[in-house]
Image: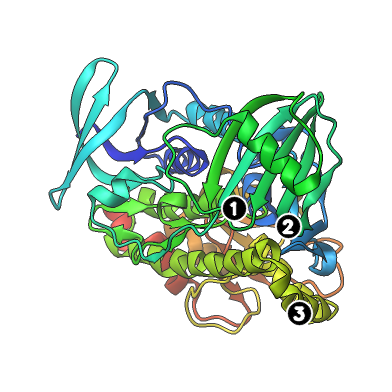
Amino acid sequence: MDAPVIIVGAGPAGLVLAAELRLGGVEALVLDRLERPSQESRSLGFTARAVELFDQRGLLPRFGDLGISASGHFGGLPLDYSVLMDAHFGARSIPQATTERVLGEWAAELGADVRRGWTVVGLHDDGDSVRVEAETPGGPRLLRCRYLIGCDGGHSFVRAAAGFEFPGTPSTREMFVADIGGCALRPRPIGERLPAGMVMATPLGDGVDRIIVVEHGVPPRRRTRPPEFAEVADAWERLTGEDMRGGTAHWISSFGDATRQVTEYRRGSVLLAGDAAHTHLPVGGQGLSVGVQDAVNLGWKLAAVVRGSAPPALLDSYHAERHPVGARLLVNTLAQGVLFLSGSEVEPLRAVVADLMELDEVRRHLAGMVSGLDIRYDVGPGTHPLLGARVPKRELRGPDGPTTTIAGLSTGRGVLLDLADDPELRRAAEPWADRVDVVTAAPHRLPPGCLLAGTSAVLLRPDGHVAWADPGCGPLPDALDRWFGTRRVAASRQ
């Protein structure tokens, strides 16, 4: 085989998946049709859960100043995300080009093979392998892999060629997005609703503004090239009365509000992640962020299956866990689109939602939904309140000095937090030492209400979700077997 895993698409999801596979000791080949990374940064940041995932892998310093803020919105209605403990809206003012550069450098350092100018034009799942046809700078190539992953966006070739069902609703409107220089536009960071549509303007620095223009009653068009600057400027003037024709367009694109999700994230040896699996109205950086979460969820599982340290059935948990998250993403972006982009007919609905958002419980629900911080997986029986949730970042003190609950996740392995210095617990985990690291340290300065209080041990999956905790769960070996493979398999490979 040319590689155990071939990933189609070198966007954020594809690059993160490649890096995660390399952390798991598996070769990853990434094919992308573009000869060089795009500089069109549709996304300008990522949500709080994506920030946490990058922090778990030690990547945050590479982004520089993240501009993290607790202020955000839901459908254009202001929402303070600090209503959740340690929460924030996410990282702002990080162009997608910067995110892809950071992730690309990380994947390359780990040994991922990214080949640009390679366009996948055919595939066939033979059952025990996948044949991939590609047009390359050197001519046609035929590759083989054990698993093929489509991370090739909303118009995914892999999704269509592999026969995935992609139900949903088509676009009902067309929107423009552009970076415009030399106009000094009035900032409208969360958007401004106007009688005939909605506009958004965010200063990016150096006299450049990111704008979004949505006009009511403008149907989607099938375009073969980006809109002209004059078309965008005309729409802006119709909505705002402002003339920006003296500016310069750095880049322009159009998009719609199509909302679709595949019925299954895996068909045989072909899997999908990111926008290839779900497409929706882009709101609050959720698309990029959920795609990254898909990749992190899939990466360690796929690596374990390819290595042979876990059974192929572990991959079934990818669809089981991520499909509901994608479905919820579609619901919340559809709801925000109705609130934000509709006309005066939705004013009564906006008024009701605004009243509801005065309630702490409602604000916590919406903040958890959009940030991704309230995601909880079914990881097995137990009553501990952290079970299935992501572990909060907390200070720990141990024999080797200060650390945190997430520091051990930087290698992409499982982590057993021994918070009570329990030698019997450590002995129980020894048969999985090739896949799970043990950190012995005690919590330090826990904030009021922290769910780690009274907890003696926590088993973390490589994605930072709690797979087992004590007290409140059954035997530790049962959880280790379920998520990291059996001792018998591990022994046979030593």
Give amino acid for label 3: Pro
| Circle 3 crowding by C-alpha within 10 Å: few under 14, some 14–19, many from 20 | few
Q: Check whether the beta carbons of the residues at disc 2 and disc 1 lie within 8 A of each other.
A: no
- The residue that disc 1 covers is 282
Can you tell which of label 2 and label 3 is closer to the viewer?
A: 3
Residue plotted at (68% across, 72% down): 456
Element under disc 3: helix
Viewer-proximal residue among 314 and 280? 280
- The residue that disc 3 covers is 348
In the image, residue 252 above or below residue 393: above
Task: Inspect this view and state whether residue 185 appears.
Answer: yes
Give amino acid for label 2: Lys
Task: Inspect this view and state whether residue 308 appears.
Answer: no
The count of marks equals 3
| Circle 2 crowding by C-alpha within 10 Å: few under 14, some 14–19, many from 20 | some
Work out which quarter of the rendered image holds the N terminus and state it: top left
Viewer-proximal residue among 36 and 391? 36
Mark sitting earlier along the chain (2/3): 3
Residue 245 placement, left or right of 43: right
> Where residue 310 appears, x then y in whole percent?
33, 58
Between the C-alphas of marks 1 and 3, the distance is: 24 Å
Mark sitting earlier along the chain (1/3): 1
Q: Which mark is residue 393?
A: 2
Between the C-alphas of marks 2 and 3, the distance is: 40 Å
Residue plotted at (31% across, 59% down): 266
Between the C-alphas of marks 2 and 1, the distance is: 28 Å
Residue plotted at (49% across, 68% down): 327
